Image: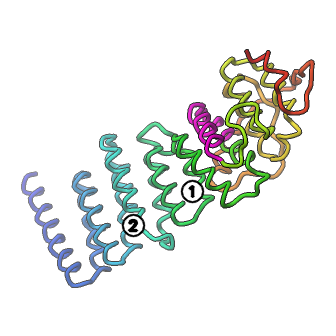
Amino acid sequence: MIASTERGQRGINRVLAKLEHSINTGNYYEAHQMYRTLYFRYIAQRKYFECMDLLYSGALRLVRNAQEPSAADLGLLIVDTLEKSGHRTNIELWIERLSALIENLSPTTVERETLINRCIKWSGEVSGHNLGHPSLHKRIARLLWSEGNTEQARHHVLLCRDGNMCGRFLVKISEKKSYTSEVDLIIVQAVLQQLCLKDRKTAEETFTTYIRQHPDIKRKAAPYKEILLNFIYFLFLCIDINRSATFRSLCDLYKPSLDRDPSFQKYLVKIGVLFFDINPSPPSSGANMMGGMFGDLFSRLFQGFDDDDENNELLQERGHGDGSHISHELD
């Protein structure tokens, strides 16, 4: 056994020597193949940490020499090694390292998106955050925003569990990418999505930051000029007091305004399940209004709903959108 281990180490040392020669002579294709060879040998010997350290240093060396596709490939091998190792230690270290590697890859590197998705999947599995570790989402959101990829950046910022950052980010989107008439739709959609992830704390932080920092919102506390901002204010109160009848009435009262975005109804169905134990009616078979990552995410969240024919309870008094007359139900 000892002799076999020694032979294995001598073999690794020979490959390492060839690797250094390839790097020094600019033969980066051969160097990439040497890294892959060492990966298989380290994995066979279960030297996971040595393997990951080697691959990380190698990826950075390849990036510095403009070999981004090869560097991304080594990044994928790092994630593969992390998965094989079964260890849950040093999660933050490897999130930091993988994020740094991703940040060194240009957006034109085809393999970068695959690496991002693999990193998110791994970080979710080892951290308990099913949709990926918030720290990783935060780093990726900042990177994509700096590259001008606003829509993809938004997907990640909504999962970073940092309401202050998310609110400020949405203000920038509203100012640069949206119509003035959509100042309320942007924050309402974000808050409803965060509530669908049962992240009430971040949702309220996002809402508070947005309304305080957006220059076009005339009031910083309820009641607001924008009707849907009042809806969100009352929705948080409904969640706090856990009254399903009030929630149903609130949704019914604000339905004309909520209908401005067809996706809101689907979010509210999920919120009714999560916070008020309301069994929903089957979701409609219409087109999915949510694209990209959140389209897939919420499609999964909305699967498995049971039929429910229970009618919504109505308010005895109806107003025209400011919701002030139902505040007595929320005391």
Which of marks 2 and 1 precedes in the sequence?
Answer: 2
* Secondary structure type for disc 2: loop
Which residue is drawn at the image coordinates 84% and 49% (left, top)? 286
Please give the range of residues in magenta. Answer: 191-214
Quadrant of the rendered image containing residue 309: top right
Please, is residue 108 above or below residue 273 in the view? Answer: below
Chief secondary structure of the magenta span?
A: helix
In-front residue for pair 140/222: 222
On residue 153, the disc is 1
User: Residue at position x 39%, y 67% from top?
Assistant: 104
Asked if residue 211 is among those painted magenta in the image, a careful observer would answer yes
Q: Is residue 201 magenta?
A: yes
Marks 1/2 in contact by CB < 8 Å: the verdict is: no
Query: How far apart are labels 1 and 2 at the CA level?
Result: 17 Å
The amino acid type found where label 2 is placed reads Asn
Relative vertical location of residue 323 with respect to residue 76 in this rendering, above or below: above
Residue 260, image x and y in percent?
Answer: 84, 46
Image side of residue 320 versus residue 194, left or right: right
Horizontal and vertical percent for residue 107? 50, 69
| Camera-side residue of 165 and 31 | 165
Q: Secondary structure at mark 1?
A: helix
Q: Which residue is mark 2?
A: 104
CA neighbours of label 2 inside 10 A, class few (<14), some (14 to 19), many (20+): some
Q: Nearer the viewer, residue 238 or 32?
A: 238
Q: Position of residue 168 (x, y in %)?
A: 57, 48
Mark 1, Cα crowd under 10 Å, few <14 / some 14-19 / many 20+, is: many
Callout 1 amino acid? Ala
Q: Give left or right: position of 26 versus 66.
A: left
Q: Quadrant of the C terminus?
A: top right
- Residue located 66% across and 41% down the image: 211
- Position of residue 92 in the picture relative to residue 6 (left or right): right
